[in-house]
Image (tube, grey):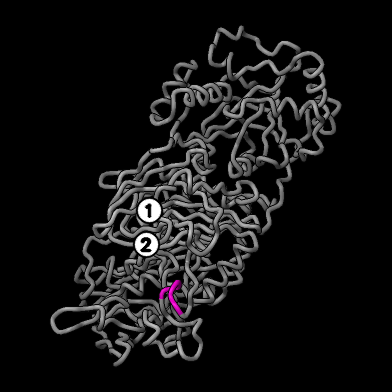
C-alpha cells in the first residue's frame, strides 16, 4: 500500500466528493487509458501545452503518468482541500478512467472511497513532514509506502520519475513514523475484515450557503444543471431571417419567477405568427433547449411609439399579444422567445427566470441596462437622437424605456455575443449557477450575499446606487466579484415606473447641469460615477477603471505566478490575439480604491492615436473576498464554442475555468491574497489617469 498526494484546486477538491474519485485537471488532454509509456504522455502534454516550459511539461507528464499507471487499487490518496485547509483521505477502488460525462476539469479519474477529512492541526507531525516534502510542482506524488523501500523499479528505469515522481521520503525513523501516522488516520474506519466502511468526507463549510447537490454546503456543482443540460438541445433558437421592422416585440418585465406570468407585446406585418421559448445553456453544444411553443396567434401592426418632449424617451404602449405563464417547466436561466411571422420574418425577445430563494454558488447578472442604453429603437438611445436626416449626441434621450423592442441583435441585443459564451461554459461544467438582471439587483441588492460569487458580464456600464451599494456590501461580506468585460459601473442611473410596471424607465442625463435631481439629492445625479457631484469612481469597487475605446489589441499576460494561471502553461509575455477591445480598462496607482491590486495582464495598445495599456486585475479584501476584472469587453467572446469563424481561445477558457472554480468555492482572498505588482510589471507607465474617452 502506498500513500499518494494528489493536488487539486478548490473546485476539483469539491468535485472529487461528488464524483467519488480522485481527479486531475489538464482539460486539453483527452482519454489516456491507452497511453502505455511516460514518453507517450510527455508527447501528449507537449501537444496540449506548447507554450509551457520544457521542464514544466516534463513535471506535469511525470505526475500524470503516476496518476494513470502507478497508483494501484488499495493505495491511499491524500488530497488537500485548499492550501491551508483540511486534507481528505481515501482508498483507491479502481483503475484510471476517463469520464466524458463529468465536468471537463475533472474527467481524468481514479475511483476512490473517501474515508476521512483531517484538519492540518490534527495530523501527526511525521505525516505532515512527509506531505510537505512532496514536490509542489507535481500534480501527483507518491509520499510513502508500507515498506522502507519506496520504488519497485530502479529510479533510473524512468529518469524523470526517478528524479521527480518517486522521491524516497520514507527514510529511517521518519518513514516508519509517517506510515504509522497514515495508518492512524484510517484506523477508525477499518472494520474487522480489513475493509473500510463507506464514509463521505465533510468538506469545509463555505462562508455563504450553496444549493450543492450533496447537501454539504460547499459543492460548486449542481445536479439539476447537469441534468438540465443533458436534455436534448437544439440550435433552432437561431434566426435565419431576422426582421426588426417586419416582426418585433418586448416582454412586460426583464425577468420573472416560476408562478409569474409575462405579457408579450408583438407587432408584425404578418397575419399570423408563432412564438417559441428557448432556455439558453450548453445542451451538447447546441446552445439552447426548446421549453414552450405557442399555437398560431393572430398578428397585427401595433401603434406607433410615442416620444416624450424634453427627455426624448421612446415608448411603445402596445396591447399584449399573448401571455406566457412561467410554470415549473421553466428552470432558472436566460431565455429567448423566437417570434416567427407567417411571412417568414423572425425576432427575439429575451427574458430571465430568477429564483430569489436560491443560494447557488454563482449569481450571473444579465446586463439589460446597457442593452437598453444603446437601444436606438424608435430613433433615440442614451447616445444618439434624431437631428434632421442624421443623429447626434445632443439630441439623445435622457430617459429610455423597457417598453419597446431591442433593435440590436434582432431583438437579443448583446446577449448572444457578450454573455451567452460564459453561460454555455458554466452550464457545460455543471456549475451551481442562477441568474438575475441589473433591474433585479437594484430591486433586491441584499440577495447578493446569498451567493459565493457575483458575475457581471460583457458590457455592464449602467448601475444604480442600490446596485453599487449592494455589490460593495456583498464584497465586504466575503462574496467574490467577477467583472468579465470592461467599462462596468461607469455611469449612474435611476429607475422610474411605467404603466407596465416598476423600474421600466431608465434615467441617465449624463450631465449634472441637466439632471433635476442634482439640486435635490446630489448623490443620485446621473453622471459618470467618478464625476462630481457623485465622485465615486468605479475603481473603488472593480480595482481598475474604464479608459477608452475603440481598440483592437493583443492581450499580454505578465504574472504567470498568479493562482489563476495554474495549469495553463501561461508564461510572461504569452498573448491572446485581439484579446483587448473594443473598450478597455486600466489600473493606475493613484486611482481611488484598493492599492493591493495584482496586475495579471498588461497589454500595450494605441487608442485614438494615444499609446496606453489595458489591464487584467485581481485584488483581495479584508473580508476574504476576491475581485477580478478582465479589463476587456472581448474576453467573453474568447469563451465561444470552437468552430469556423469562432473567437474561441483555449487559454482564455482555461483561465476562466480556474476563476470559476476558485470563486465558486468561497472567499478567494482567504486562499489567494493578491500580490501587488504594479512596479514590477508596469512601473514605467503613467502614474495618473488621463481624461477619459466617453464610452460609445
Q: Residue furthest left?
A: 389
- Left/right placement of residue 392 relative to residue 464 reads left
Q: Circle 2 sits on which residue?
A: 547
Q: Residue at x 64, y 17 (%)?
A: 167
> Residue 331: percent from the left, percent from the top?
51, 63
Query: In this orientation, does residue 331 appear?
Result: no
Given residues 306 and 55, the one toward you in this image is 55
Q: Residue at x 41, y 43 (%)?
A: 557
In the figure, residue 245 lies in which quadrant?
Answer: bottom left
Image vertical order of residue 671 relative to residue 173, above or below: below
Q: Residue furthest bottom?
A: 309
Q: Badge 1: how crowded within 10 Å, few (<14), some, or many (20+)?
A: many
Query: In this orientation, does residue 498 appear?
Result: yes
Image vertical order of residue 132 relative to residue 423, above or below: above
- Left/right placement of residue 378 relative to residue 437 reads left
Q: Are dots 2 and 1 in contact, CB under 8 Å? A: yes
Label 2's element?
A: strand
Given residues 373 and 14, the one toward you in this image is 373
* Number of numbered tags placed on the structure image: 2
Given residues 639 and 632, the one toward you in this image is 632
- Left/right placement of residue 443 relative to residue 215 reads left
> Residue 676: percent from the left, percent from the top?
54, 48
Lower position in the chain sequence, tag 2 or tag 1: 2
The residue stretch that appears in magenta: 528-532
Q: Circle 1 sits on which residue?
A: 614
Q: Which mark, residue 528?
A: none
Q: CA distance from mark 2 to mark 1?
A: 8 Å
Amino acid at each position: 500500500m502506498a500513500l499518494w498526494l494528489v493536488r487539486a484546486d478548490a473546485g476539483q477538491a469539491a468535485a472529487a466528493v461528488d464524483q467519488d474519485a480522485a481527479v486531475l485537471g489538464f482539460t486539453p488532454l483527452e482519454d489516456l487509458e491507452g497511453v502505455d509509456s511516460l514518453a507517450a504522455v510527455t508527447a501528449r502534454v507537449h501537444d496540449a501545452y506548447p507554450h509551457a516550459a520544457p521542464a514544466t511539461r516534463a513535471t506535469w507528464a511525470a505526475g500524470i503518468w503516476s496518476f494513470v499507471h502507478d497508483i494501484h487499487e488499495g493505495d491511499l490518496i491524500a488530497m488537500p482541500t485548499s492550501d491551508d485547509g483540511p486534507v481528505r483521505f481515501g482508498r483507491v477502488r479502481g483503475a484510471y478512467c476517463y469520464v466524458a460525462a463529468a465536468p471537463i476539469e475533472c474527467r481524468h479519474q481514479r475511483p476512490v472511497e473517501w474515508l476521512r477529512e483531517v484538519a492540518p492541526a490534527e495530523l501527526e507531525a511525521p505525516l505532515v513532514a512527509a506531505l510537505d516534502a512532496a514536490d509542489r510542482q507535481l500534480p501527483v506524488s507518491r509520499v510513502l509506502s508500507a515498506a522502507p523501500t519506496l520504488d519497485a523499479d530502479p529510479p533510473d528505469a524512468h529518469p524523470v520519475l526517478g528524479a521527480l515522481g518517486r522521491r524516497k521520503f520514507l527514510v529511517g525513523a521518519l518513514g516508519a513514523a509517517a506510515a504509522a501516522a497514515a495508518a492512524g488516520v484510517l484506523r477508525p474506519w477499518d472494520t474487522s475484515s480489513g475493509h473500510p466502511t463507506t464514509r463521505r468526507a465533510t468538506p469545509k463549510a463555505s462562508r455563504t450557503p450553496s444549493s450543492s447537490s450533496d447537501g454539504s454546503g460547499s459543492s460548486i456543482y449542481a445536479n439539476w444543471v447537469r441534468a438540465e443540460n443533458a436534455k436534448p438541445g437544439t440550435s433552432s433558437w437561431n434566426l435565419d431571417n431576422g426582421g426588426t421592422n417586419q416582426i418585433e416585440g418586448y416582454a412586460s418585465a426583464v425577468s420573472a419567477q416560476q408562478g409569474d406570468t409575462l405579457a408579450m407585446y408583438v407587432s408584425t406585418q404578418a397575419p399570423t405568427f408563432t412564438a417559441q421559448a428557448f432556455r439558453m445553456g450548453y445542451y451538447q453544444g447546441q446552445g439552447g433547449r426548446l421549453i414552450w411553443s405557442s399555437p398560431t396567434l393572430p398578428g397585427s401592426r401595433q401603434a406607433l411609439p410615442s416620444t416624450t418632449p424634453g427627455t426624448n424617451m421612446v415608448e411603445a404602449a402596445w396591447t399584449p399579444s399573448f401571455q406566457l405563464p412561467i410554470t415549473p417547466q421553466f428552470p432558472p436561466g436566460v431565455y429567448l422567445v423566437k417570434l416567427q411571422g407567417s411571412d417568414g420574418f423572425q425576432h427575439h425577445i429575451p427574458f430571465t427566470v430568477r429564483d430569489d430563494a436560491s443560494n447557488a454558488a454563482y449569481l450571473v447578472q444579465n446586463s439589460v441596462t446597457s442593452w437598453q442604453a444603446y437601444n436606438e429603437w424608435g430613433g433615440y438611445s442614451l447616445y444618439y437622437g434624431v437631428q434632421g436626416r442624421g443623429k447626434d449626441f445632443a439630441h439623445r434621450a435622457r430617459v429610455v424605456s423597457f417598453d419597446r423592442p431591442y433593435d440590436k441583435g434582432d431583438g437579443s441585443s448583446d446577449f448572444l455575443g457578450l454573455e451567452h459564451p460564459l453561460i454555455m461554459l458554466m452550464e457545460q461544467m455543471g456549475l451551481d449557477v442562477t441568474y438575475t438582471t441589473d433591474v433585479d439587483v437594484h430591486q433586491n441588492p441584499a440577495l447578493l450575499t446569498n451567493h459565493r460569487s457575483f458575475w457581471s458580464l460583457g458590457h455592464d456600464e449602467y448601475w444604480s446606487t442600490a446596485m453599487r451599494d449592494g455589490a460593495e456590501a456583498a464584497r465586504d461580506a466575503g462574496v467574490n466579484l467577477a467583472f468579465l468585460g470592461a467599462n462596468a459601473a461607469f455611469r449612474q442611473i435611476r429607475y422610474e415606473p411605467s404603466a407596465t410596471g416598476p423600474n421600466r424607465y431608465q434615467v441617465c442625463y449624463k450631465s449634472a447641469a441637466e439632471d433635476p435631481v442634482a439640486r435635490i439629492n446630489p448623490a443620485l445625479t446621473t453622471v459618470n460615477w467618478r464625476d462630481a457631484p457623485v465622485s465615486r469612481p468605479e475603481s473603488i469597487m472593480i480595482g481598475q477603471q474604464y479608459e477608452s475605446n475603440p481598440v483592437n489589441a493583443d492581450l499580454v499576460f505578465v504574472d504567470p505566478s498568479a493562482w489563476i494561471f495554474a495549469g495553463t502553461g501561461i508564461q510572461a509575455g504569452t498573448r491572446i490575439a485581439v484579446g483587448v477591445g473594443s473598450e478597455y480598462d486600466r489600473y493606475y496607482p493613484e486611482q481611488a480604491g484598493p492599492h493591493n491590486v495584482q496586475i495579471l495582464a498588461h497589454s500595450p495598445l494605441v487608442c485614438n492615436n494615444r499609446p496606453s495599456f489595458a489591464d487584467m486585475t485581481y485584488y483581495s479584501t479584508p473580508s476574504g473576498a476576491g475581485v477580478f476584472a478582465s479589463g476587456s469587453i472581448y474576453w467573453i467572446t474568447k469563451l465561444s464554442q470552437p468552430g469556423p469563424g469562432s473567437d474561441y481561445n483555449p487559454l482564455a477558457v482555461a483561465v476562466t475555468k480556474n476563476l470559476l472554480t476558485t470563486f465558486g468555492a468561497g472567499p478567494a482572498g482567504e486562499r489567494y491574497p493578491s500580490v501587488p505588482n504594479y512596479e514590477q510589471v508596469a512601473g514605467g507607465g503613467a502614474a495618473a489617469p488621463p481624461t477619459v474617452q466617453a464610452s460609445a
